[in-house]
Amino acid sequence: GLHRFAATLGLGVVLPRLLLALRAAWSVRARAQRLAWSPADAYVASVLAQRRHGAGGGAAAGGGRVVQVLPHGFTPAPAATLALRSLLAAALGPRADLHVAPATPYGEEDRPVPPPPAGAGWRVAWFDAAATPEPQAQGRFVETLRAASTLPLALLVDEGGFRQRMAGFGDGAPRLAQRRAAWRQFAETCGGTLALVDLGAAAADLETAADRLRAVLGRPAVPSPR
């Protein structure tokens, strides 16, 4: 009677579903064991590092991973912008968010600049090493940026174009050294942190360029998993 009905229900309904659930669990476990990944993989390492440092949230919770870049005196080429984006990701992690503002022309350093985007942790004044730093131009631009926001401000100087121009001259190396010294002096005078980077060659030595950018942004290097 009732016991026979319960036994029939268990064998006909409960047991097949239990077997299906066990089979699905075994399949998931087998696939997980076959999944090939290594802690040395760049993407995996970045994800692990973000979780370790509590940076798994959105951009606003990324602790300075939203960066506003403001060019002065030149309009960045698309290739340079892409190189800077890659460099920023290498320096701050794949969640780094780059916002490039419209360039400020020479002579218009006093005009209002765009406000920082939501969640921004840094502003970066982007200069071209081909220009000689002057208090009335680049210096005034830095003052305008500081007056507009209390966010930390870093100075980024792309020396790629200047390197290419000097390559055809026999005294190119001394001229490059002099221009670097001028920008370092400028940074000391205005009290800014400076990164001299060749964006055209950054891909060839991405880690070195990322270290320079990390240093001026005051961010620690992402530790390698052990």
Image (cartoon, rainbow, N blue to C red):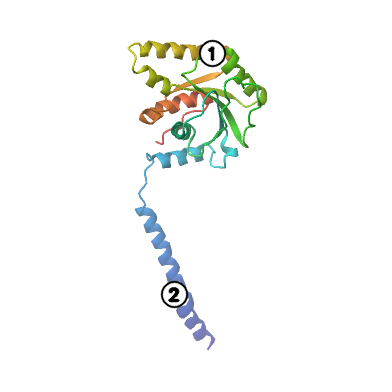
* Front in this rendered view, residue 88 or 3: 88
Q: Secondary structure at mark 1?
A: helix
- Mark 1 or mark 2, which is nearer the start of the sequence? 2
* Horizontal arrangement in the rendering, residue 19 relative to residue 191 (left or right): left
Q: Residue at x 48, y 78 (%)?
A: 13
Q: Residue at x 57, y 39 (%)?
A: 59
Q: Residue at label 2?
A: 16
What x and y, as percent, mark residue 48?
A: 46, 40
Q: Residue at x 37, y 46 (%)?
A: 37
What x and y, as percent, mark residue 185?
A: 51, 11
What is the three-letter code of the residue carrying label 2?
Pro
Q: CA distance from mark 2 to mark 1?
A: 77 Å
Mark 2 surroundings: few (<14), some (14-19) or many (≥20) residues within 10 A:
few
What is the three-letter code of the residue carrying label 1?
Phe
The numbered dot on residue 186 is 1
Number of labels in the image equals: 2
